[in-house]
């Protein structure tokens, strides 16, 4: 066995050199061709095999669309069937609310009548006790201040309404705090008695939002709001505009188009508060 010299070794016989040469000279086209030829042979043996995946895909899409259509149809049918029932339930709720509101109004009217009778009896008793009627006059005056008895006198009427073209988010809607500021301004300006939409205001009256409505003593109001104030008609309007509440409403009218109309009247009658919850009070600084 004779040794072969380096000069007789074929080029590229070294393992590393042979691998690099193979990678440089042989591409992967032959492998791709081999795979393609095998796939062609399988397709030839199974005619129509290429069409089956496409058909299944189309069939799946059609089934999905059909199922979606069925679901939408069932939903629409259920909605149409439930709509009359929902409308009937809504009408029933509205009717019940109106009936209870009417009953509540009747109870308030009855309570006001009883309070009037009680006031008359109280005045008669005061006259019997005090022949000079001083006690009766004091009771009437304190009742007006407390808001428990009706009050009559000159004053002013204010009409408030949302902006005609105002949007709820840009200041065109009257808020509970706007009405609170106006009422506080009227008290500061010298009003002796105030009512909002016929509801007499007292030291215990609440003005707030409930849902999207302003409530006075938990009774919902709707615009336009009518505020009546008994006081000196010659000074009450001008003094109101000098208060913070009056200035606020001038700004609301100028900037947002909210209605703020005022007019004086020679005689205004305000009812007493039907909710007589005041149990004890004394003039400030009496102690």
Image (cartoon, helix red, strand yellow):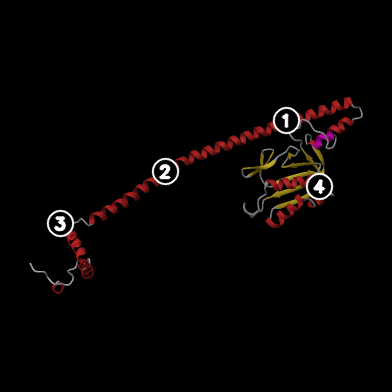
Query: 48 left or right of 153?
Result: left
Quote the CA–CA distance across marks 4 and 3: 104 Å
Q: Quadrant of residue 217?
A: top right
Q: Which residue is mark 2?
A: 77
Q: Nearer the viewer, mark 4 or mark 3?
A: 3
Q: Position of residue 66 (x, y in %)?
A: 34, 49
Quote the CA–CA distance across marks 2 and 4: 62 Å
Query: 121 left or right of 210?
Result: right
Query: 156 left or right of 127?
Result: left
Element carrying mark 1 = helix
Q: Position of residue 141 (x, y in %)?
A: 84, 35
The answer to whether marks 3 and 2 mark residues whose Cβ atoms lie closer than 8 Å is no
Q: Quadrant of residue 5?
A: bottom left
Q: Nearer the viewer, mark 1 or mark 4?
A: 4
- Numbered range of the magenta stretch: 140-145
Q: Which residue is mark 1?
A: 111
Which dot marks residue 189?
4
Element carrying mark 4 = helix
Is residue 144 magenta-colored? yes
């Amino acid at each position: 066995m004779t040794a072969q010299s380096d000069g007789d070794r074929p080029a590229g016989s070294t393992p590393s050199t042979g691998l690099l040469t193979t990678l440089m000279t042989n591409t992967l086209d032959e492998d791709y061709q081999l795979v393609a030829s095998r796939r062609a042979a399988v397709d030839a043996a199974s005619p129509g095999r290429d069409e089956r995946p496409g058909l299944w895909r189309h069939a799946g899409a059609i089934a999905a669309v059909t199922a979606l259509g069925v679901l939408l149809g069932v939903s629409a049918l259920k909605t149409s069937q439930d709509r009359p029932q929902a409308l009937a339930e809504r009408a029933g709720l509205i009717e019940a609310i109106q009936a209870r509101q009417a009953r509540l109004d009747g109870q308030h009217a009855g309570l006001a009548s009883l309070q009037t009778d009680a006031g008359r009896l109280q005045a008669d008793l005061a006259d019997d006790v005090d022949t000079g009627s001083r006690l009766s006059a004091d009771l009437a005056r304190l009742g007006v201040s407390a808001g428990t008895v009706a009050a009559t006198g000159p004053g002013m009427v204010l009409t408030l309404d949302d902006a005609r073209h105002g949007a709820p988010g840009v200041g065109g809607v009257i808020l509970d705090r706007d009405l609170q500021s106006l009422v506080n301004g009227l008290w500061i300006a010298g009003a002796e008695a105030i009512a909002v939409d016929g509801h007499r205001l007292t030291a215990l009256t609440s003005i707030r939002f409930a849902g999207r409505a302003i409530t006075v003593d938990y009774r919902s109001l709707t615009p336009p709001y009518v505020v009546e104030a008994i006081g000196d008609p010659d000074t009450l309007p001008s003094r109101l505009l000098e208060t913070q509440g009056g200035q606020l409403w001038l700004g609301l009218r100028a900037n947002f188009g909210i209605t703020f109309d005022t007019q004086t009247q020679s005689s205004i009658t305000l009812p007493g508060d039907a909710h007589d919850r005041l149990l004890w009070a004394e003039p400030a600084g009496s102690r």
